[in-house]
Image (cartoon, helix red, strand yellow):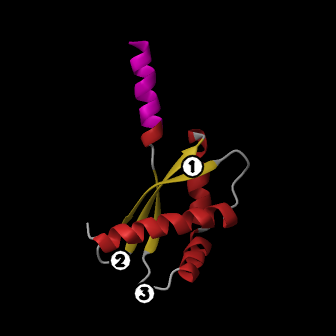
Amino acid sequence: MSERIVKLNKLFKEHLGEIFQRELSLKPGVFLTIAKVDTTPDLRYTRVSISVFPFKDTDYAMKTLAKEIYSIQGALNKKLKMRPLPRLQFVSDSTEEEADKIEKILIQI
């Protein structure tokens, strides 16, 4: 992965975190964490892995992100002065839930 892509991923993560705090309307008690950001080398797409707490609200959070993706993309476009600007794709990251399941199994053993 090029140094440029690494810097862009970090920049996207910072700006998206700010946008989520200010503009995303989630029900109380639901928290999003940006787990990982991957931008394609041709700068066409950026895949944002989202971790949701509590995990049972993942479907709700992902539907909310899908519904508000155009406003999120627009807010990101205003913050960044680059062309082409990658299109956002949000995916659910279940790493924490998987780790929790493994930890519970290990405790039982």
Query: For residue 49, which quarter of the picture?
Result: bottom left
Residue type, numbered disc 2: Leu
Q: Which residue is mark 3?
A: 83
Q: Which of pointers 3 and 1 indicates the residue nearer the eye?
A: 3
The Cα–Cα distance between marks 3 and 1, rounded to whole angstroms, is 32 Å
Residue type, numbered disc 1: Asp
Residue type, numbered disc 3: Arg
Neighbours of disc 3 within 10 Å: few (<14), some (14-19), many (20+): few
Q: Earlier in the sequence, mark 1 or mark 2?
A: 2
**In percent of the image, x 70 and y 44: which residue is there?**
29
Q: Which of pointers 1 and 2 indicates the residue nearer the eye?
A: 2
Q: Quadrant of the C terminus?
A: top left
Q: Which residue is mark 1?
A: 59
Determine if the magenta segment contains residue 85: no
The Cα–Cα distance between marks 1 and 2, rounded to whole angstroms, is 28 Å
Residue numbers of the magenta segment: 97-109
Neighbours of disc 1 within 10 Å: few (<14), some (14-19), many (20+): few
Q: Are marks 1 and 2 in contact (CB under 8 Å)?
A: no
Prevailing secondary structure of the magenta residues: helix
Q: Which residue is mark 2?
A: 43
